[in-house]
Amino acid sequence: MRIALIKGDGIGPEVINQAVKVLEAVSERFGCGFEYQEVLMGGRAIDETGVPLPAETVDICKKSDAVLLGAVGGPKWDGLAGSLRPEAGLLGIRKALDVFANLRPAVIFPQLKSASTLKEEVLGDGLDIMVVRELTGGAYFGEKKRVDTGHGIKAWDMMVYTSLEIERIARKAFSIAGKRRKKVTIVDKANVLESSRLWREVTGEVSKAYSDVETAYMYVDNAAMQLVRNPGQFDVILTENLFGDILSDEASMLTGSLGMLPSASIGESGVGIFEPIHGSAPDIAGKDIANPLAAILSCGMMLKYGFNMEKEADAVFKAVNSVLDNGYRTVDIMQRGMITVGTEKMGSLVADSMRHNREGMK
Ligand code: IPM
Ligand code: MG
C-alpha cells in the first residue's frame, strides 16, 4: 500500500512520525508492506513553493492508496488572502480526491471518562456517535463573491447542493448506521433553508432502501442543544458541510479529549484522506508534548475504511487501549496517579504493544 504523507504544520510532523512508527509495527506483525511518500500542503507548501497545494501533491496523492495528514495552518499564514491560506490547500485536496464523506467518530474511552465536560449521568453508558459530514459541497464550495454596491460592500457564499450529492452521502451514512446501532439523525435547517428541504426529500427517498435503519430529522439549533443535553440519543448524525464542521467540534469535545479523535474522508472508491480532528497547535509544536493518539487512530481508520483491513485496524485500537490501561497519558489527558509521557514515548508504547501483541494486559 502506498501512503502519501502530508505531515503539515505545527504539531503535524510530530504526530505523523508516531503514526508511521505504529504502521511499521502493524506491518511487522501482520506482514503487510507500506510505502510512504512525503508531499507538501498547507503552510510549509506556501513557504517552499508559494502555493498551499502544489500540482505535484495532487498528482502523487491521486496515485497513492491513501493520504495520511497531520494538520495545516498557523498564525504565520493568517494574513494571506483566502485562496492562498493553508486551509485552501486542505479544501483543494478534498475536492481533488472527491472525498465527499467525512466520518468523525466521537467515542469516549472508558479510561478517560472523567475528562468529559459533561456530567457522568448525562454521558450514561458512554458516548459513541458517528458524525457523517458532507465534505465537498455547500457553502464551502458554492459561489463566493464580494461586490462594492456603491453604498456598502456585499459578500456572499452560496450553500448549494444537488440531489446527487445528497444521495451519495446519504447512502454512506445509512450503510454505516446499518453496521452500528441503526439510527440516522439528519440535521438541517429545513424550516428556513431551501437546500435543507432538498436534503429532507432526498434522504427520505434513500432511507426507504434501509428499512432496518431508523430515520430521524432534527433542526441544527436543536441538535446543538441535544448533543449536550442527551448525547446518548444519537448514533449516526448525517449533515451538510458547514453544520457538520460545527457539530463535529461540539461532539468531539464531549469526549473530553480532542487529542484522541481521528477522522476519515472517503469517496465512492479511490483514495481517502485520514487525519486527526485536532489542528496544528503551533503553541505546543516541537515540544514533544502533543498527543499522537488521534493520528495513530487515524491510521486505524485508514486500515479499516481505506484498505478494508479490519483485523489490523482493530489491533491499532486495542494497542491504544492497552497503553491507556497501563496508565500512560500525554499531558492533555493526564489524570491523577497516571504516568505522563511525551509524544515520542507514547508512539513507541503503542508500537511496542502492537509488536508484542499484548493488548488487554494490565
Ligand atoms: C475541519 C477544519 C477545516 C474545515 C478548516 C481548517 C478549513 O475546521 O476539518 O473541520 O472547516 O473543514
Ligand atoms: Mg472544523
Image (tube, rainbow, N blue to C red):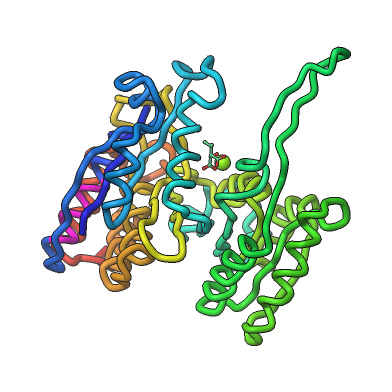
**Magenta stretch: residue 182 in it?**
no
Q: Is residue 7 above or below residue 163?
A: above
Residue 330, x across and y down, in percent: 35, 40
Extreme residue toward the bottom, this view = 211
In this rendering, does residue 107 appear at all?
yes
Give the quarter the ligand 2 occupies.
top right
Dividing the picture into quarters, in which one does residue 14 lie? top left
Residue 312, x across and y down, in percent: 26, 68
Q: Nearer the viewer, residue 179 or 315?
A: 179
Q: Residue at x 70, y 49 (%)?
A: 160
Q: Nearer the viewer, residue 59 or 312?
A: 59
Residue 266, x across and y down, in percent: 44, 58
Residue 160 appears left or right of 165: right
Instruction: Give the residues in magenta.
Output: 19-27
Dividing the picture into quarters, in which one does residue 156 lie? top right
Q: Residue at x 69, y 83 (%)?
A: 208
> What secondary structure prevails in the magenta region?
helix
Residue 319 appears left or right of 140: left
